[in-house]
Image (tube, rainbow, N blue to C red):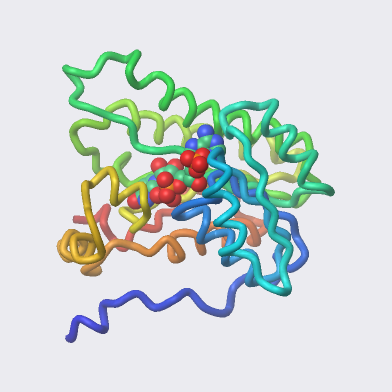
């Protein structure tokens, strides 16, 4: 087998055409998996609302995602702030069909040397961001809508130095299952994607990988010989948005990384 056969193939058709004309809010849409989701959504004709805090990066993301046939807007907001999220849904202009939450990072440090106060903001933001996004969205969405959260494989295969961040993944998955039950009478579905290591600015930064060669070398030890692409990770959320019978599910998209 040559190295080329291991290379990622761009995600192509069939992407869910059911998202054509739907409005999708991506909280965390200016980078990595959220940005890739925005591009896939625009390619199937969805109305895409990208949300992130840094205005310049957000404006660049909107330019990158926009196609002649699609509507893509960027709204700068803090996804951990329910008032800000309420403003996003107002400014989105019209009913929102799906919400994808990819905001959040991997704050950590050696357990015995890392007091809780140093992590509290990041940990709070990750959990209450998901909680608040669902609260705000559930009031504004029509029946048939969905909310998708982000989790990570470290919940199944923990690494040292990330105790609080990994514990929060468990909380987000618990929230997913709980809200799937509580919001089902509104005909809203709630799911999460549990990502393996995906090549994004976040993973490059947290793993200290500088450049494509370092990423490729680090990925060689993975079952498929590489990390996932942001596009591969993002396409899972389009599946969850469009399958009307999937709720309370945590979908693992990790290239088999959990198995080894
Ligand atoms: N990449 C991986 O290998 C991996 C693996 C497992 C799980 N995950 C999870 O998947 C999610 C996406 O990861 P990624 O790698 O795509 O990250 P990324 O490249 O760092 O992108 C994160 C995005 O979220 C935005 N964001 C962060 N905090 C925010 C806030 N409070 N309000 C609004 N927007 C916010 C960022 O923009 P601003 O900073 O400008 O706001 C950026 O657009 C994260 O939750 C991550 O923990 C990733």
Residue 39: give x, y in percent of width and height: 57, 65
Along the line of sight, the residue nearer the viewer: 18 or 206: 206
Along the line of sight, the residue nearer the viewer: 110 or 155: 110
Residue 103 in view (yes/no): no
Q: Considering the image in quadrants, where does the N terminus appear?
A: bottom left
Kindly give the residue lying farthest to the bottom in the view shown: 1
Kindly give the residue lying farthest to the right in the view shown: 94
Residue 87: give x, y in percent of width and height: 74, 34
Kindly give the residue lying farthest to the front in the view shown: 56
Task: For ligand 1, give the image quadrant.
Answer: top left
Q: Is 260 left, or right, of 206 in this rendering?
A: left
Residue visible at 45% across and 38% down in the picture: 104
Residue visible at 69% across and 36% down in the picture: 183
Examine the image and state in which quarter residue 176 appears: top right
Residue visible at 71% across and 69% down in the picture: 45
Examine the image and state in which quarter residue 169 appears: top left
Residue 224 in view (yes/no): yes
Q: Is 90 left, or right, of 112 in this rendering?
A: right
Residue 158: give x, y in percent of width and height: 24, 38
Q: Considering the image in quadrants, where does the C terminus appear?
A: bottom left
Along the line of sight, the residue nearer the viewer: 209 or 184: 209
Q: Is 198 left, or right, of 25 in this rendering?
A: left
Residue visible at 68% across and 34% down in the picture: 85
Along the line of sight, the residue nearer the viewer: 59 or 260: 59
**How many tags in the picture?**
0
């Amino acid at each position: 087998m040559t190295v080329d056969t291991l290379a990622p193939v761009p995600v192509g058709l069939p992407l869910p055409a059911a998202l054509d004309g739907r409005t999708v809010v991506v909280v965390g849409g200016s980078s990595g998996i959220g940005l890739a989701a925005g591009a896939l959504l625009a390619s199937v004709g969805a109305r895409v609302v990208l949300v992130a805090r840094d205005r310049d990066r957000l404006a660049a993301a909107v330019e990158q995602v926009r196609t002649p046939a699609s509507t893509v807007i960027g709204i700068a907001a803090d996804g951990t702030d329910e008032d800000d999220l309420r403003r996003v849904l107002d400014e989105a202009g019209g009913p929102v069909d799906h919400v994808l939450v990819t905001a959040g990072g991997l704050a950590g440090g050696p357990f015995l040397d890392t007091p809780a106060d140093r992590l509290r903001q990041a940990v709070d933001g990750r959990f209450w961001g998901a909680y608040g996004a669902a609260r705000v969205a559930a009031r504004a969405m029509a029946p048939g809508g969905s909310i998708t959260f982000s989790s990570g494989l470290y919940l199944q295969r923990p690494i040292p130095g990330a105790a609080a961040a990994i514990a929060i993944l468990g909380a987000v998955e618990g929230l997913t299952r709980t809200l799937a039950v509580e919001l089902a009478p509104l005909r809203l579905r709630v799911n999460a994607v549990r990502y393996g290591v995906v090549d994004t600015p976040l993973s490059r930064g947290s793993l200290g990988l500088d450049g494509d060669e370092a990423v490729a070398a680090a990925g060689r030890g993975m079952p498929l010989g590489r990390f996932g692409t942001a596009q591969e990770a993002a396409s899972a959320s389009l599946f969850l948005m469009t399958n009307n019978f999937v709720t309370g599910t945590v979908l693992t998209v990790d290239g088999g990384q959990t198995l080894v």
